[in-house]
Image: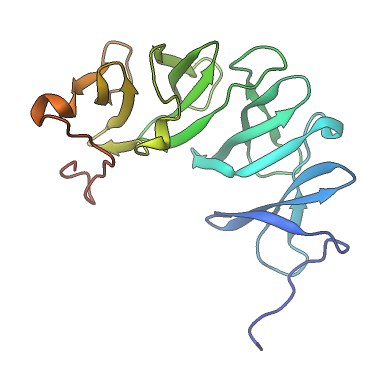
Amino acid sequence: PSGTVRVDSFAGLLPYHLIDGDSVLYLTVHSNNKVSPYKTDGKIGGKTYLDVSNPTSWSWFPKTSIPFDTKRFFIGSEVAHGSELWVTDSSHIGSHLLVDLNPGSESSKIESFTVSDRVFYFFTTFDNATKLWKSDGTVAGTQTLHSFYDLKVDDISFYSEPVVNKGNLYFTVYNQNGLELWISDGTFSGTRPIISPNQMTPNAYARRICSTSGGGDLY
């Protein structure tokens, strides 16, 4: 008990969605029908409000976010654009929409952020397609690698979270051919199926994929 102290007060409001950001902690606070993002360095009085361009319609979901290239990319939501890809440099006024992947007020339904060496990957689902994207953290560098129109389950993480191994992204998709293992080297032509598990063993399905530490074998 003696080692537990109150770091900051939010005037009786409940902080939630706590996310470890290495040297800082990200969290959200709900007040007046608005969800507000904060960060804290863990010291008394060390909280900082992460302001955004349109706070009246802003909501924040740090539970779906990743650190990349000194910044943090996350799913933010506002009335004008829906839930889309946002970025913050953790400063007071350093949070903004990076790109509206599904233009307009409809959301792009982002999921499965995965960081590689020089880019990060994620999936979206809109316009009757699940799409694989890569991004280097810039608008111009955020590009579609492949669009899936025939998935029986459009939630990529339903069977297995994508993993990076030896610089390549591996993930599974469930389409009319069954459950397939795919690879992407970050290029359009290099995003392709490797083999369907049921081609190796009848009625077999790969439910999880994982990589050994140091980027060794894939299981």
Dividing the picture into quadrants, the one containing residue 56 is top right
Q: Is residue 167 shown to the viewer in this render? A: yes
Instruction: Estimate the x, y position of residue 152 in percent, counting from the top left.
Output: 39, 21
Instruction: Estimate the x, y position of residue 219 in percent, counting from the top left.
Output: 19, 43
Q: Quadrant of the N terminus?
A: bottom right
Q: Nearer the viewer, residue 187 or 17?
A: 17
Instruction: Estimate the x, y position of residue 15 in percent, counting from the top left.
Output: 74, 58
Q: Nearer the viewer, residue 85 or 83?
A: 83
Instruction: Estimate the x, y position of residue 211 in percent, counting from the top left.
Output: 24, 45
Q: Is residue 2 above or below residue 163?
A: below
Residue lying furthest left in this view?
200
From the viewer's perspective, tell me whether residue 137 is left or right of residue 181. Answer: right
Dividing the picture into quadrants, the one containing residue 114 is top left
Q: Nearer the viewer, residue 168 or 47?
A: 168
From the viewer's perspective, tell me whether residue 213 is left or right of residue 149. Answer: left
Picture residue at 44% right of the left edge, 14% below the top: 144
Picture residue at 78% right of the left edge, 43% below the top: 35
Q: Is residue 70 shown to the viewer in this render? A: no
Picture residue at 52% right of the left edge, 27% below the top: 137
Dividing the picture into quadrants, the one containing residue 59 is top right
From the viewer's perspective, tell me whether residue 66 is left or right of residue 213. Answer: right
Q: Is residue 78 above or below residue 23?
A: above
Q: Is residue 77 above or below residue 40?
A: above
What's the coloring here?
Answer: rainbow
Residue lying furthest bottom in this view?
2
The number of numbered discs placed on residues in the rendered structure image is: 0
